[in-house]
Image (cartoon, rainbow, N blue to C red):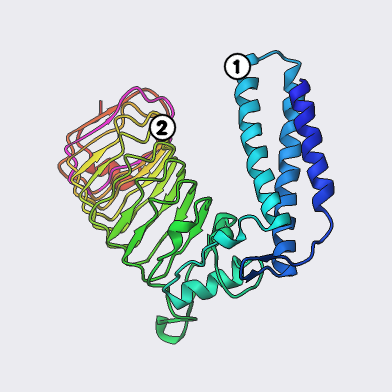
Amino acid sequence: MKIRIILFAIVCGMLLVSQAPIQAQSVGDNEITIKKLNARIKKLEEEKQTLETKLKKSQKKNSNGNCDELQAENKSLKEENKRLNADLNACLYGNSFGNETVLDIKDPQFKAYLLRCCDMDNDGEITTWDAEHTYVIICAKEKKSVIGGIFQEDSPSITDFTGIEAFKNLKVLVCSGNNLGKLDLSKNPSLEKLEANGCGLTNLILNGNKELKSLSCKNNELYDIDLSHNEKLSYLDIRNNRISVLSLNQNPKLSKINCSQNRLVSLMVSDNPKLRFIDCSNNQLNNLDLSKTEIDSVICKKNNLNSLDLRNERNITYVDYSDNRNLSVIRISQGNYVLTDDSKKAVPHIY
């Protein structure tokens, strides 16, 4: 308890010290502007407020006597306090500005976006500090329709995301509509949400994104995708690609999947107990086993299904398995489900 009170006092003391704007200081040959320093101090003060809230909550929990949890939380708070303290010292005394690196952003459109949205001190450059304090990037390519159904682009597309690897704390990236080809986000470990629709992607690398929860990369040219490192993934939309094999057995938290309009001959969802919705229509599947899921809505029309297994399910409300002319066996547990008229005609036998 005493440790937490001391931590809280330290934080409050640092806040009082840092509230007044400071004057420009020199680090070696680098002149640090007042605007730059004040922008950083403001950001740090916001983080301090968050830390204060955590400390207060931690103090309240202390009365409950959960030692293991409190010890772990206390350690985390100490580490966070140490980091913030170091950042404040850097701002106040210029200890680390000399080590700041200007990022090499090759694509002019990407750099223009970053300068508009992530250049916190408006110095005309994106530095490692700017990158580390950026949490959301929304650079989707906007399009507008014109006469004849033709789409006219408002501005040139981003084609090169070089530099994105420096954004270590990035949580949300929306880059749909750009012409990227390849997108490697393996060095963005904090990423939780990605929307990269219609980017001409042939290669998407996500093997370093353990926090990823939502992924939408529809309307691309992907032939395969590796999601084996994304255990927290709960939402997946990869419709309209060219994927033939999709293994999702390493994604136990998936609840919604749209993998329609691919070239799937194999879909593995046997280890997805939380799955509630799936649309795998317009593929080349022969079998679909959803017996170990919590599925309530299934759209699997226009495949080559021979069997469909929905056993052990009591929550099914909608099933569309039309246009599967070879389908001979459907295993369904007791429960409510609704079939379309076409699917009723197409199915020869129901258990």
**Horizontal placement of 348 versus 29: left or right?**
left
The segment highlighted magenta reads 303-322
Q: Where is residue 190 in the image (x, y as percent from the top left)?
A: 49, 46
Q: What residue type is labelled 2?
A: Ile
Q: Where is residue 117 in the image (x, y as percent from the top left)?
A: 60, 68
Which badge, 1 or 2, comes first in the chain's sequence?
1
Provide the residue designation for mark 2: 316
Residue neighbourhood size for the residue with mark 1, other residues' Cα within 10 Å, grouped as few (<14), some (14–19), many (≥20):
few
The secondary structure making up most of the magenta span is loop
Return the residue found at the far bottom.
147
Count of numbered circles on the image: 2
The residue depicted at 41 percent of the width and 37 percent of the height is: 254
**Horizontal placement of 244 versus 67: left or right?**
left
The residue depicted at 34 percent of the width and 46 percent of the height is: 207
Q: Which is more toward the observer, 241 or 97?
A: 97
For the N terminus, the image quarter is top right
Provide the residue designation for mark 1: 68
**Horizontal placement of 62 versus 199: left or right?**
right
Q: Position of residue 195 (x, y in %)?
A: 45, 57
